[in-house]
Amino acid sequence: MRSDVTLLPLDRPLLTALLAVAVADADPPEVMPPVPDPTGGDGWTAERRAAFVRFHAWRSLPPDPVESTYAITVAGRVAGAARLCPRPDRNSNREREGPGTVEADTVEAGLWIGRSYRGAGVGGTVLRLLIDRARADGHDRLYLSTTPENTAMRQLMSGIGLIGTQGEFAL
């Protein structure tokens, strides 16, 4: 595991740095949900930049956020983002046995890394840090999914025993 990789809770200044990394080192579909541009433009148009900031501000920065988002830093430089998001759809039907127990708590993990940091062990370290953080936050299962084309993420998933494009990992 790389010792120079950290996860910092996202705040406004880090969101500005994260947008700069996304624009310089990733394509929009790699880092956020699809955003059609009314001008028909490709890449990081003004509309997509604004949507990136709105998306993260809405999901991660309010007092009661939808998810916990972290700036991935490598040697102190922002290199991408990682997130943990509760999965109520996965938690509502799962029960644990025994007195005083509550429903299992599944959290979804996601991450993206700028191109210039890929292939250097950053993703594996980030996944381990997310697993540690999910455990520390009291979650007992981690859900991951990706596309069939994302071989890097599929390799990370297979490293923790998940084969295919989606699955849950017991913490």
Image: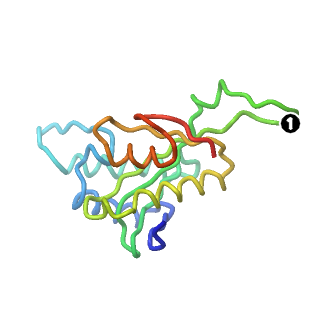
Dot 1 corresponds to which residue? 100
* Residue in view at x 66 percent, y 24 percent: 93
Instruction: Work out whether residue 46 or residue 80 is closer to the camera in this orientation and state it.
Output: 80
Coordinates of residue 31 in the picture (x, y in percent):
32, 48
Coordinates of residue 33 in the picture (x, y in percent):
33, 39
The kind of residue tagged 1 is Gly
Colour setting = rainbow
Question: Seen in the image, is 76 located left or right of residue 49?
Answer: right
Coordinates of residue 136 in the picture (x, y in percent):
66, 56
Question: Seen in the image, is 26 located left or right of residue 139?
Answer: left
Q: In the rendered view, would you say 84 is above or below 39?
A: below
- How many marks can you see? 1
Question: Seen in the image, is 91 located left or right of residue 120?
Answer: right
* Residue in view at x 88 percent, y 33 percent: 99
Q: Secondary structure at mark 1?
A: loop
* Residue in view at x 40 percent, y 57 percent: 123
Quadrant of residue 169 within the rendered picture: top right
Q: In the rendered view, would you say 164 is above or below 62?
A: above
Disc 1 residue crowd, few under 14, some 14–19, many 20+, Cα 10 Å:
few
Which residue sits furthest top? 93
Coordinates of residue 45 in the picture (x, y in percent):
17, 49
* Residue in view at x 69 percent, y 49 percent: 138
Q: In the rendered view, would you say 161 is above or below 8?
A: above
